[in-house]
């Protein structure tokens, strides 16, 4: 019966995030934005961090090491023997992982995972009913074909950079990539303490649950990309600061939109290198923990020749 309740709730929402719900007033949004800006978010100071997509084995390994450490810190996973948080989605070439780098050290991470028929999305483990509704519609797609649902995952920022623009710059990369791949629905699962940040970026809380540990509360959030683009396109100088940030920094004047295709080509080339794949995924034991069906899905993703050479 849970699925019926989810369908009814999301059907009331329609494509417009916030429709049928009480949205924060402009004044409240401005106060939240001012608070987050005082904390270092929504500005331009990344504390010398360079923001880009991870397209080398070293950067991917460092990224997933930081994700591991942050997940252990907040109690959402137990420490892994290899110190990496590697799941099947990280083994897919279509998963884009963006990093903030200072002096060769990764200090921030954000990934975009594209839904696949075989593996779905990371948040399916807790919010499968909610995501299934988004996969099926009934709202129109941006591409005119099947609905593309993506998930913002692997959010991690090193402690010294949490009160900086690193998180918002990584989200600008994520928005740029989501637009490139034609994303219809962008979802994420975050801790309750981080939900206000995502609300400022247009996301709406849909459901709550527990993450991978009983102590890890989780908020499932969603934004319809086409609706977000349409809403902020009408913004003017009198609009609230958060809307203007989305319009100017994430969409219209997002410098990463001119870089994502080049990064995508480099990432695809990286995932065609069996030595890199062996180092990251076979040596870590990830593939040995997979079911036969999961291994076959990874094989199709890499290509049979590359998979055989990497395994």
Image (cartoon, grey):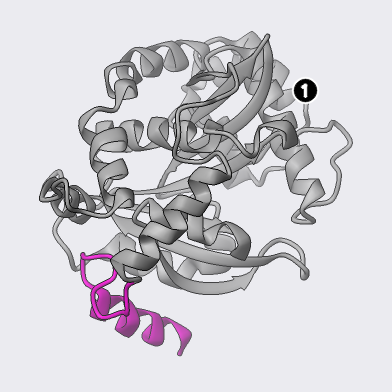
Tell whether 250 sits left or right of 228.
right
Tell whether 98 sits left or right of 176.
right
Query: Splitting the image into 4 quarters, where does residue 64 fall?
Result: top right
Q: Nearer the viewer, residue 78 or 156?
A: 156
Q: Which residue sits at x=50%, y=65%? A: 220
Q: Which residue sits at x=54%, y=45%? A: 38
Is residue 242 positioned above or below 31 on the image?
A: above
Query: Splitting the image into 4 quarters, where does residue 40 fall?
Result: top right
The residue indicated by pointer 1 is 283
Q: Which residue sits at x=74%, y=42%? A: 70
Q: Quadrant of the N terminus?
A: bottom left
Q: Is residue 10 located in the magenta-colored stretch of the structure?
A: yes
What range of the chain is rendered magenta?
1-23
Instruction: Return the x and y of residue 85 as percentages of the image width and height.
Output: 72, 38
Instruction: Return the x and y of residue 310 as percentages of the image width and height.
Output: 64, 16
Q: Is residue 286 visible?
A: no
Q: Is residue 52 visible?
A: yes
Is residue 14 positioned above or below 34 on the image?
A: below
Instruction: Return the x and y of residue 273 as percentages of the image width and height.
Output: 55, 9
Residue farthest toward the right in the current orientation of the protein: 81
């Amino acid at each position: 019966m849970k699925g019926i309740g989810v369908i009814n709730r999301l059907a009331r929402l329609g494509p417009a995030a916030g429709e049928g719900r009480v949205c924060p007033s402009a004044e409240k949004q401005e106060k939240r934005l001012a608070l987050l800006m005082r904390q270092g978010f929504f500005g331009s100071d990344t504390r010398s961090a360079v923001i880009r997509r991870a397209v080398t084995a070293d950067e991917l390994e460092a990224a997933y090491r930081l994700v591991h450490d942050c997940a252990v810190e907040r109690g959402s996973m137990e420490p892994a023997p290899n110190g990496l948080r590697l799941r099947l989605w990280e083994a897919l070439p279509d998963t884009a992982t963006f990093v903030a780098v200072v002096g060769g050290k990764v200090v921030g991470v954000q990934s975009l995972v594209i839904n696949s028929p075989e593996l779905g999305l990371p948040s399916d483990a807790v919010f499968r009913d909610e995501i299934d509704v988004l996969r099926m519609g009934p709202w129109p797609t941006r591409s005119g074909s099947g609905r593309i649902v993506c998930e913002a995952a692997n959010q991690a920022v090193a402690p010294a950079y949490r009160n900086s623009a690193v998180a918002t710059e990584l989200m600008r990369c994520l928005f740029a990539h989501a637009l490139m791949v034609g994303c219809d629905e962008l979802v994420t699962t975050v801790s309750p303490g981080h939900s206000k940040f995502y609300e400022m970026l247009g996301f709406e809380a849909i459901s709550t649950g527990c993450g991978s540990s009983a102590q890890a509360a989780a908020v499932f959030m969603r934004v319809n990309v086409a609706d977000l683009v349409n809403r902020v396109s009408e913004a003017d100088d009198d609009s609230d600061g958060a809307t203007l940030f989305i319009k100017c920094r994430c969409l219209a004047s997002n410098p990463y939109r001119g870089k994502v295709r080049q990064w995508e080509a480099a990432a695809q080339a990286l995932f065609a290198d069996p030595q890199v794949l062996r180092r990251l995924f076979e040596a870590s034991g990830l593939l040995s923990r997979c079911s036969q069906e999961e291994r076959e899905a990874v094989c199709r993703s890499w290509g049979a020749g590359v998979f055989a050479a990497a395994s």
